[in-house]
Image (cartoon, helix red, strand yellow):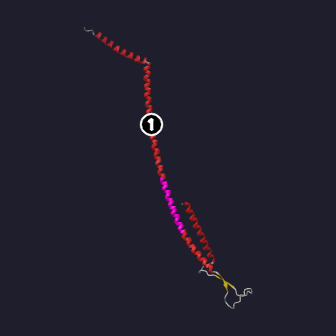
Amino acid sequence: MSDSPEVDQLKERIAHTREELGETVEALAAKADVKARASGAVHDAVDSAKAKVQGLADSARETVAGAKDKVTGAKDTALEKAADAKDTAKDKAVDAKDTAKEKVAVAKEKVAGVKDRVVDAKDKVAEVGTRRWAQPGVDTGDPLDPEGALVVVEERPAGLDRRLQAALFATAVGAVLGAVIVWVRARRRS
Protein backbone atom coordinates (compact mmCIF):
# COMPACT_ATOMS: atom_id res chain seq x y z
CA MET A 1 0.00 0.00 0.00
CA SER A 2 1.13 3.10 -0.82
CA ASP A 3 1.00 5.84 1.52
CA SER A 4 0.01 9.19 0.54
CA PRO A 5 2.56 11.70 -0.37
CA GLU A 6 1.97 13.54 2.81
CA VAL A 7 2.68 10.46 4.84
CA ASP A 8 5.88 9.85 2.91
CA GLN A 9 6.90 13.41 3.51
CA LEU A 10 6.11 13.10 7.14
CA LYS A 11 8.14 9.90 7.44
CA GLU A 12 10.99 11.58 5.73
CA ARG A 13 10.83 14.53 8.11
CA ILE A 14 10.72 12.18 11.07
CA ALA A 15 13.79 10.31 9.84
CA HIS A 16 15.61 13.56 9.26
CA THR A 17 14.62 14.85 12.68
CA ARG A 18 15.81 11.59 14.27
CA GLU A 19 19.14 11.97 12.54
CA GLU A 20 19.52 15.55 13.76
CA LEU A 21 18.49 14.52 17.26
CA GLY A 22 21.08 11.75 17.21
CA GLU A 23 23.77 14.19 16.24
CA THR A 24 22.62 16.66 18.87
CA VAL A 25 22.60 13.94 21.52
CA GLU A 26 26.10 12.88 20.53
CA ALA A 27 27.28 16.51 20.71
CA LEU A 28 25.64 16.97 24.10
CA ALA A 29 27.12 13.70 25.31
CA ALA A 30 30.56 14.84 24.14
CA LYS A 31 30.12 18.14 25.95
CA ALA A 32 28.90 16.37 29.03
CA ASP A 33 31.95 14.04 29.02
CA VAL A 34 34.35 16.37 30.89
CA LYS A 35 37.00 13.69 31.28
CA ALA A 36 37.16 13.04 27.53
CA ARG A 37 37.18 16.78 26.78
CA ALA A 38 39.93 17.37 29.37
CA SER A 39 41.90 14.45 27.98
CA GLY A 40 41.56 15.87 24.47
CA ALA A 41 42.60 19.32 25.66
CA VAL A 42 45.58 17.79 27.45
CA HIS A 43 46.56 15.87 24.32
CA ASP A 44 46.24 19.04 22.26
CA ALA A 45 48.31 21.01 24.79
CA VAL A 46 50.93 18.25 24.93
CA ASP A 47 51.14 18.10 21.14
CA SER A 48 51.40 21.89 20.97
CA ALA A 49 54.09 21.93 23.68
CA LYS A 50 56.02 19.15 21.94
CA ALA A 51 55.92 21.09 18.69
CA LYS A 52 57.13 24.26 20.45
CA VAL A 53 59.92 22.37 22.26
CA GLN A 54 60.98 20.73 19.01
CA GLY A 55 61.02 24.13 17.30
CA LEU A 56 63.08 25.67 20.13
CA ALA A 57 65.46 22.70 20.13
CA ASP A 58 65.98 23.02 16.38
CA SER A 59 66.53 26.77 16.74
CA ALA A 60 69.01 26.20 19.58
CA ARG A 61 70.90 23.60 17.52
CA GLU A 62 71.12 26.02 14.62
CA THR A 63 72.32 28.81 16.93
CA VAL A 64 74.92 26.55 18.55
CA ALA A 65 76.11 25.32 15.16
CA GLY A 66 76.41 28.92 13.93
CA ALA A 67 78.30 29.95 17.07
CA LYS A 68 80.56 26.90 16.77
CA ASP A 69 81.33 27.82 13.16
CA LYS A 70 82.10 31.40 14.17
CA VAL A 71 84.37 30.27 17.02
CA THR A 72 86.15 27.82 14.73
CA GLY A 73 86.61 30.56 12.12
CA ALA A 74 87.91 33.00 14.72
CA LYS A 75 90.27 30.35 16.10
CA ASP A 76 91.62 29.56 12.63
CA THR A 77 92.06 33.26 11.86
CA ALA A 78 93.85 33.82 15.17
CA LEU A 79 96.15 30.85 14.55
CA GLU A 80 96.97 32.11 11.07
CA LYS A 81 97.71 35.60 12.37
CA ALA A 82 99.86 34.20 15.18
CA ALA A 83 101.81 32.05 12.70
CA ASP A 84 102.30 35.06 10.41
CA ALA A 85 103.43 37.22 13.35
CA LYS A 86 105.83 34.49 14.47
CA ASP A 87 107.31 34.18 10.99
CA THR A 88 107.63 37.96 10.66
CA ALA A 89 109.29 38.26 14.08
CA LYS A 90 111.65 35.39 13.24
CA ASP A 91 112.59 36.99 9.92
CA LYS A 92 113.18 40.35 11.59
CA ALA A 93 115.30 38.71 14.30
CA VAL A 94 117.41 36.95 11.66
CA ASP A 95 117.80 40.21 9.73
CA ALA A 96 118.76 42.08 12.91
CA LYS A 97 121.25 39.37 13.83
CA ASP A 98 122.80 39.46 10.35
CA THR A 99 122.96 43.26 10.43
CA ALA A 100 124.56 43.18 13.87
CA LYS A 101 127.13 40.62 12.68
CA GLU A 102 127.95 42.81 9.70
CA LYS A 103 128.33 45.88 11.90
CA VAL A 104 130.50 43.94 14.35
CA ALA A 105 132.69 42.76 11.47
CA VAL A 106 133.03 46.32 10.15
CA ALA A 107 133.77 47.59 13.67
CA LYS A 108 136.39 44.85 14.13
CA GLU A 109 138.03 45.90 10.87
CA LYS A 110 138.04 49.52 12.02
CA VAL A 111 139.43 48.51 15.41
CA ALA A 112 142.16 46.50 13.70
CA GLY A 113 143.02 49.54 11.57
CA VAL A 114 143.04 51.76 14.64
CA LYS A 115 145.20 49.25 16.51
CA ASP A 116 147.69 49.33 13.64
CA ARG A 117 147.73 53.15 13.79
CA VAL A 118 148.16 53.06 17.57
CA VAL A 119 151.12 50.68 17.21
CA ASP A 120 152.59 52.94 14.55
CA ALA A 121 152.06 55.94 16.80
CA LYS A 122 153.69 54.12 19.73
CA ASP A 123 156.67 53.30 17.54
CA LYS A 124 156.93 56.94 16.52
CA VAL A 125 156.66 58.04 20.14
CA ALA A 126 159.36 55.57 21.10
CA GLU A 127 161.64 57.18 18.54
CA VAL A 128 161.08 60.54 20.20
CA GLY A 129 163.54 61.12 23.00
CA THR A 130 166.44 63.22 24.18
CA ARG A 131 170.11 63.06 23.36
CA ARG A 132 173.08 65.24 23.99
CA TRP A 133 174.00 68.01 21.66
CA ALA A 134 177.02 66.64 19.97
CA GLN A 135 178.41 69.65 18.13
CA PRO A 136 181.81 70.50 19.46
CA GLY A 137 182.58 74.08 20.21
CA VAL A 138 179.03 75.16 20.86
CA ASP A 139 178.54 76.86 24.20
CA THR A 140 175.09 76.27 25.71
CA GLY A 141 175.58 78.91 28.35
CA ASP A 142 174.60 76.57 31.14
CA PRO A 143 177.36 76.22 33.75
CA LEU A 144 175.66 73.14 35.23
CA ASP A 145 175.69 71.28 31.95
CA PRO A 146 179.32 71.15 30.89
CA GLU A 147 178.65 68.40 28.38
CA GLY A 148 176.36 70.51 26.29
CA ALA A 149 172.71 71.18 25.85
CA LEU A 150 169.96 68.55 25.65
CA VAL A 151 168.09 68.48 22.42
CA VAL A 152 164.64 66.91 22.03
CA VAL A 153 164.51 64.90 18.86
CA GLU A 154 161.13 64.22 17.42
CA GLU A 155 160.29 62.60 14.18
CA ARG A 156 156.83 63.33 12.84
CA PRO A 157 155.15 61.98 9.80
CA ALA A 158 154.97 64.61 7.10
CA GLY A 159 152.28 67.17 7.94
CA LEU A 160 151.23 65.48 11.20
CA ASP A 161 151.24 67.69 14.28
CA ARG A 162 150.22 66.98 17.88
CA ARG A 163 146.60 68.11 17.48
CA LEU A 164 146.12 65.73 14.61
CA GLN A 165 147.73 62.94 16.61
CA ALA A 166 145.38 63.68 19.52
CA ALA A 167 142.40 63.66 17.18
CA LEU A 168 143.50 60.31 15.71
CA PHE A 169 143.94 58.88 19.20
CA ALA A 170 140.48 60.10 20.23
CA THR A 171 139.03 58.58 17.04
CA ALA A 172 140.74 55.29 17.81
CA VAL A 173 139.37 55.28 21.35
CA GLY A 174 135.88 56.13 20.05
CA ALA A 175 136.05 53.35 17.46
CA VAL A 176 137.11 50.84 20.08
CA LEU A 177 134.28 51.93 22.41
CA GLY A 178 131.80 51.83 19.54
CA ALA A 179 132.89 48.32 18.60
CA VAL A 180 132.57 47.20 22.22
CA ILE A 181 129.04 48.66 22.42
CA VAL A 182 127.99 46.98 19.15
CA TRP A 183 129.47 43.69 20.34
CA VAL A 184 127.64 43.90 23.70
CA ARG A 185 124.31 44.69 22.01
CA ALA A 186 124.77 41.83 19.56
CA ARG A 187 125.48 39.44 22.43
CA ARG A 188 122.33 40.57 24.25
CA ARG A 189 120.13 40.01 21.19
CA SER A 190 121.41 36.53 20.48
Quadrant of residue 4 within the rendered picture: top left
Q: What residue is rendered at 53% in x and 68% in y?
A: 105
Residue placed under numbered mark 1 in the picture: 59
Q: Which residues are magenta?
A: 83-106
Q: Position of residue 68 (x, y in %)?
A: 46, 42
Q: Main secondary structure of the magenta part?
A: helix
Q: Nearer the viewer, residue 146 or 99?
A: 146
Q: Position of residue 185 (x, y in %)?
A: 57, 62
Q: Nearer the viewer, residue 66 or 104?
A: 104
Q: Quadrant of the N terminus?
A: top left
Q: Quadrant of the C terminus?
A: bottom right
Using residue 139 as the reference point, say whether residue 47 is left or right of it.
Answer: left
- Crowdedness near tag 1: few (<14), some (14–19) or many (≥20) residues, C-alpha within 10 Å: few
Quadrant of residue 28 within the rendered picture: top left
Q: Is residue 97 magenta?
A: yes
Q: Position of residue 39 (x, y in %)?
A: 43, 22
Q: What residue is rendered at 56% in x and 65% in y?
A: 183
Quadrant of residue 166 within the rendered picture: bottom right
Q: What residue is rendered at 41% in x and 16% in y?
A: 29
Q: Residue furthest left?
A: 1
Q: Is residue 109 magenta?
A: no
Q: Position of residue 10 (x, y in %)?
A: 31, 11
Q: Residue furthest right?
A: 143
Please state which amino acid type lies under the numbered disc 1.
Ser
Using residue 110 as the reference point, say whether residue 139 is left or right of it.
Answer: right
Give the secondary structure at mark 1. Answer: helix
